Amino acid sequence: MGDILTIEGLTLATKRDVLVRDLSFRIAEGERFGLIGESGSGKSLTSLAITGLLPPTIRASGRITLAGQEITGAPERRLCGLRGAAVATIFQEPLTALDPLMRLGKQIALPVRRRLLREGQDAGRAAVAREVRALIDQVRLPDPDRLIRAYPHEVSGGQRQRVAIAMALACRPRLLIADEPTTALDVTTQAEIVTLLTGLVQAHGIALLFISHDLAVVGQVAERVLVLRGGEAVETGPAAKVLTAPRAPYSRDLITAARRFDTALEGRP
Ligand SMILES: Nc1ncnc2c1ncn2[C@@H]1O[C@H](COP(=O)(O)OP(=O)(O)OP(=O)(O)O)[C@@H](O)[C@H]1O
Ligand SMILES: [Mg+2]
């Protein structure tokens, strides 16, 4: 199968600093890819570059091709066409993606309607409502009648993240970017969301770019990973290999630190 995303020699810089340097990787259609790195290593900037949402103060050079289209230097019109159809993003804090003053059912309905129109299908009230119900079901949200009428602040953090996943799925993207999607949640909810997300992208054949500093989580999700440090790739390869037998000293340090953290949590010496 072909690649949904290729990044070649991506460099992101402000007038003063180089934030991401000469980064290259590719994601095949339907593949689950993990981007790992400590805070400030350039993970979110890379994801913003892919969706063409970099702040204006940051210049990009190199080449990003998404669904066969060049992103770097593309006009906003073309990028708009790609968002949703080719790529959708789930963020760390679902509240940032949700409108606090709009009922959740309506928020899910918006991308559903946009996609039905895009595909030239029936986008009438009944068709949209049916699809909204189906999505709520897929992300296993309880009590759909209440949920549809609820505002974001009236449901839990985990439920808000499920709504955000439903909105992303509503677009039927070919690539889903999840930027630290579970960091704001407790450990049990984290595990549930990760299992749900992995199952859904597999079921729909959607490629996943999963961004996290949490190696245990990335190991559960990704088939291949890239380790980023200070804006540069230090290692890339199959997840099982990089996470169990890292070659780069920095990857080894990350893994040792994660193990130490796990041990501390379990209260063992
Ligand atoms: N608009 C900006 N202008 C200048 N520098 C920025 C801007 N946005 C981010 N940076 C810097 O770029 C670097 C990478 O930031 P980025 O947000 O990609 O990190 P990250 O890997 O996502 O970290 P985290 O795990 O904390 O989310 C950081 O040093 C950050 O301070
Ligand atoms: Mg980030």
Image (spheres, rainbow, N blue to C red):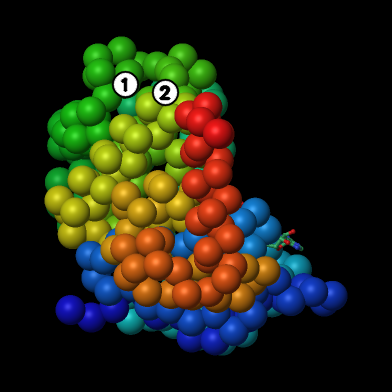
Can the viewer see residue 77 in this picture?
no
* Amino acid type of the residue tagged 1 in the rendering: Ile
* Amino acid type of the residue tagged 2 in the rendering: Arg
Q: Which residue is mark 1?
A: 148
Q: For this view, does 235 lie left or right of residue 166?
A: right
Of 171 and 89, nearer the camera is 89
Q: Residues within 10 Å of mark 2 (few under 14, many from 20)?
A: some
The answer to whether 228 is drawn above or below residue 103 in the figure is below
- Quarter of the image with the C terminus in it: top right
The answer to whether 241 is drawn above or below residue 131 in the figure is below
Q: For this view, does 212 lie left or right of residue 237?
A: right
Residue 94: x, y in percent?
Answer: 49, 36
Query: Helix or strand or loop: what does disc 1 sit on?
Result: helix
Q: For this view, does 217 lie left or right of residue 201?
A: right
Q: Which residue is mark 2?
A: 103
Residue 239: x, y in percent?
Answer: 34, 64
Query: Helix or strand or loop: what does disc 2 sit on?
Result: loop
Of 154 and 76, nearer the camera is 154
The answer to whether 257 is drawn above or below residue 1 in the figure is above
Q: State the separation of the CA atoms marked 2 and 1.
A: 7 Å
